[in-house]
Image (cartoon, rainbow, N blue to C red):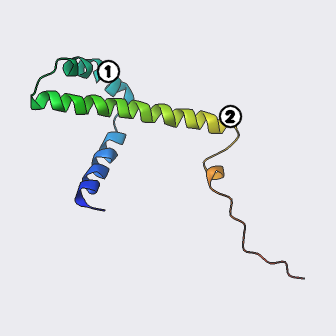
Amino acid sequence: MNSLENSLQKIAESILHFDEASLTALWEKYKNKIEQFSTSPDWEKAVIIFSIINAVRAKNAIFNEMVIKNKASGKTEQNNKPQVKPHLKLVK
């Protein structure tokens, strides 16, 4: 893994600890900031922050949907692993 990828991994790890409710409270603020286009670094940061907020919300929605789907079908996380036949032989 290269240094760019390592940096992105660290950023993602940090973002995973953010509370969605707190992020959602900031959504409108950053939406308004990006609607007021400027060529400033602050506007560019606002776009990134807005995108992060949306990414966390999308991740949580997908995660929750999959948990509900798995519960409805009676699956658990352990059951999601591929079934591997044991390497056993019948001995008489």
Please state which amino acid type lies under the numbered disc 2.
Answer: Ala
Residue lying at 28% horizontally and 46% vertically, measured from the top left? 11
Residue 38 higher or lower than 41, as above or below: above
Q: Secondary structure at mark 2?
A: helix
- Per the model, the C-alpha gap separating discs 1 and 2 is 31 Å
Residue 34 higher or lower than 7, as above or below: above
Residue lying at 70% horizontally and 40% vertically, measured from the top left? 74
Q: Quadrant of the C terminus?
A: bottom right
Give residue 34's position: percent from left, percent from top.
21, 22
Please state which amino acid type lies under the numbered disc 1.
Answer: Ala
Q: Which residue is mark 1?
A: 25
Give residue 3's position: percent from left, percent from top.
23, 59
Q: Which residue is mark 2?
A: 72
Residue lying at 11% horizontally and 32% vertically, measured from the top left? 41
The crowding category of the residue bearing disc 2, from other C-alpha atoms within 10 Å (few below 14, some 14 to 19, many at least 20), is few
Judge from the rendering whether residue 46 lies leftward or rightward of residue 63; answer left or right: left
- Badge 1 or badge 2: first in the primary sequence: 1
Q: Nearer the viewer, residue 75 or 54?
A: 54
The crowding category of the residue bearing disc 1, from other C-alpha atoms within 10 Å (few below 14, some 14 to 19, many at least 20), is few
Q: Nearer the viewer, residue 92 or 46?
A: 46
Classify residue 81 by image quadrant: bottom right
Give residue 72's position: percent from left, percent from top.
68, 34
Q: Quadrant of the N terminus?
A: bottom left
